[in-house]
Structures are given as structure tokens and as C-alpha cells.
Amino acid sequence: MKKKTLHSILWSIGLGVMSISLTYASDNPARSEMNRLVDRTIKTSLVCMERSVAEVGDTLKYPTYGTKDLRWQTNGSGDWVSGFYPGALWYSYALSNDKKFETWARQWTSGIAKEKYNMESHDLGFRFMCTFGNGLLWGDPKLADSYKANILTAAETLSKRYHPLFQLLSSNWDKFPEPNSVPVVIDIMMNLELLFWAAENGGDEKYYEMARSHAVATWKDFVRTDGGTYHIVRYDKSTGDIINKGQLQGEGTETTWSRGHAWLAYGLVVAYRFTHETQFLDKAKLAMDYFIRNLPEDRIAAWDFHSKVDYRDVSASAIVTSALYELITYLPEGAEKDHYSREADLMLSSLCQKPYFTEGKNTNCLLDHSVQYYPINSNVDVPCSFADYYFMEALYRYKQLYMK
């Protein structure tokens, strides 16, 4: 396996070291208008992020979901979403070059460190790549060794969830467990980056094959013939055979939960970034195509693509928007690249405007109208920290592509 420099591995977290040829000329009127929208959105978002520090207050508390009146609820580092707020602070620093954001990002990142030993969670990638990973890009170089050590330890902890029998990492939860079963959820695609990165930066090289095989098996077992996806697949722990497939956070067994599908699409782009295997790029495009095909006119995904319950989930569109801005960097100039660029711009444009962007609403949450877990009525139609994180990432990636 070819070794790479730290920045060449981490570039995708911030698109910080790439030189990109633009799909559209800078003097294109549509591009200029989009640039103005993004610039205004970045400035407003930075004001909200600065105010959020006072709202949250305690550096050991992490925003999770917003209330109906758009105030942050918080929890400790043990919550699976804890890495997103410090991650958004790192993006605030990258977008502004204002040292106060670096200070805050470092403070909230430090509280995540103990989670590197958390054997009860499959979501260590979220926690450590959004925080310590971004910190390696933009933080104090004197902290690089400790940041790297935290990531490598977290990767070793995550690797213990790998099951050679069916070549997947297991989920830490299942609302409807079967006897003798091992649950795997599609969300885990987002945690493969931790293993890929660790394998190429001093960790055990077995992590690379774990991550790669998980991506291969996820496509094989989670994707239906129509291109839609299951949220969960349960495996027999003795034989490795599939017991059943279905949804947890989606509406029904054969529906497609949009955020779960977004996790898959983003994760496949990451798999291509690290492996350079065409199969992952091709699969990422197929996953994107299904997502795009099922979007309403304003490009903000329904919480479940097949539900008649009319709630949107901005987090799903934010995740895919960010992933598209990475995907297009791997495509040659031409109609295909232009297509995905336009779709990314259309999604980001909607995210930057009412009713999704919260400008003028006296709140420090950036995006409204996410759905965490509709079937149990948990955090429905409210802001969430992961929507804001991927929104900030999408804004940063857009700026790196088109506004430098």
C-alpha cells in the first residue's frame, strides 16, 4: 500500500491543498451570483458560530439537536454527535482565519480524547476525524503528535468491531435485535475514514482492508436493485448469513431513509479517495444518482424518500452536497462533471436560503428542518449539529473550488 503525506490524506476534510480547475469560468454570471450567496452565508454562519460559544458555555458539553425554538440541546462527549460542534468550529477557523475559532475548536476538541477507548460506539470516525483530524490540518503544529496518537488509538478501538466472518464492522445498537444476530447499520460507512487514515499514518495496515471490505460488503448487502438502501442488515453471528434487512430510522422495511443513503454516498467517495479503485467511484455516482433522482424541486431531501409524512431532512442534503464537491474533483471535464457540479450548487443554494438557513431567526443553529428518528418521534423537524457540520464543510469546499 502506497504511503502518503499527512496533508495528501487529510485534504478531503478541508480540500486544503488541492488545485482544482473550475467547471465554470469565474466571470460566469450564475457563478458570480452563487459566490455572493455563499460569501454572505459564510459571514452569517461565522457570526452564529461565535455566538454559539457563549450559548453552549461549557467546553465539555456538545450541541446535539435544536429545540423547536431553535436553541441548542447539549450532551457529553459520549454522545455520537459530539464531534460535530468542534468540527464546525475548525471549519469556522478555516473559513475566517480568526484565531479565536482555533482556540475554541481546540478547547472543545480536547474533551473528545477519552472517547478513543469507547468500545460501545461504532461512531468513532465522526468523533475523531471531525475534531483531531481537522485539528491536524489547521491546529497548532505542536499538537500534531498528540492529535495523531488520539486518532490511531481510536482506530484500534474501532477495529475491534470488525467481524471477519462477514467482513463488516458491527453496530453498537439495534432497536429490534434478533437472537444470535450481529447488526450492521449503513451509518458505519462514515467511520471508515478513520481506519483508512490510520492505516496510512502509522496504524496497523489491517485497518485498510477492514475499511475496504466493509465498503464492498455494504454495497452488496445494503443496496437494492432499484438503487435504494436498507438502514440495517442483521447477520447470524455463527454462520455470517443474513438474517434480515430493513429500516430503523426510516419509515418501512423497503423504503429508503434519506440520511442513511447520504451516509452511503459520502462513504463511497471516501473509499475511492483512499483506494483509487474505480468500483468505488462508480458506486458513489450510482448512489448520488438515486439520491438526486428522488429530490423535490428545491433539492432538500424528504426524511424518507418513500414516506407520505411531509418532513424534510436538511442533514441528508448537506451531507450529499459536501460529498459532491469532493466527487467532482475526481471527474474529468465534461458533461458528467458539469451535471454533478450543478446538482451540488442547487442543493447548496437551497441550504443557504429560507426556510432552511436560519438567517434572521435569532438563533445560533445554522440549518433548520432535520429529522433524527421519526418512528420514535425523536428530534423531528429541528436543527441538528451534524447538518451544520456538513453544511460548513460544503461551504468550505465550495469556497476552495470556486472563490480562491
Image (cartoon, rainbow, N blue to C red):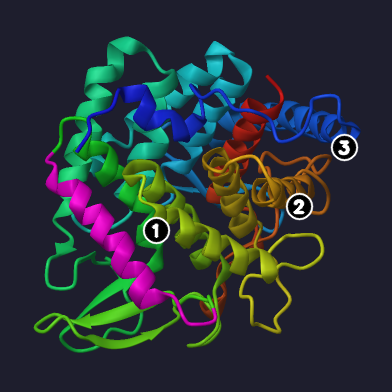
Q: How many marks?
A: 3
Q: Position of residue 80 (x, y in %)?
A: 38, 53
Q: How far is the residue under mark 3 from the one under mark 2?
A: 21 Å
Mark 2 vs mark 1: which is more N-terminal?
Answer: 1
Residue 74 x %, y %:
49, 47
Badge 2 crowding class, 10 Å Cα cut-off, few under 14, some 14 to 19, many 20 or more, is: some
**Amino acid tagged 1:** Gln
The dot on residue 253 is: none
What is the span of residues highlighted in magenta in the rendered image? Answer: 204-226
Instruction: Give the amino acid type for the residue marked by disc 2 in the picture.
Output: Tyr
Residues under labels 2 and 1: Cα distance? 34 Å
Q: Is residue 10 left or right of residue 203?
A: right
| Residue 208 included in the magenta stretch of the image | yes
Instruction: Kindly identify which residue carries mark 2.
Output: 356
Query: Mark 1 sits on what residue?
Result: 279
Which sits in the foreground, 305 or 54? 305
Give the image location of residue 48, x and y in percent.
Answer: 68, 32
Q: Residue at x 40, y 48 (%)?
A: 272
Residue sitting at 49 percent across and 66 percent down? 260
Q: Quadrant of residue 163?
A: bottom left
* Secondary structure of the residue carrying numbered label 3: helix
Q: Residue at x 66, y 51 (%)?
A: 340
Report if residue 121 is visible in the image.
Answer: no
Q: Main secondary structure of the magenta part?
A: helix
> Seen from this angle, which residue lies furthest right?
29
Which disc, if any, is residue 30?
3
Q: What's the amino acid at mark 3?
A: Ala
Label 1 environment density (alpha carbons within 10 Å; few <14, some 14–19, many ≥20): few
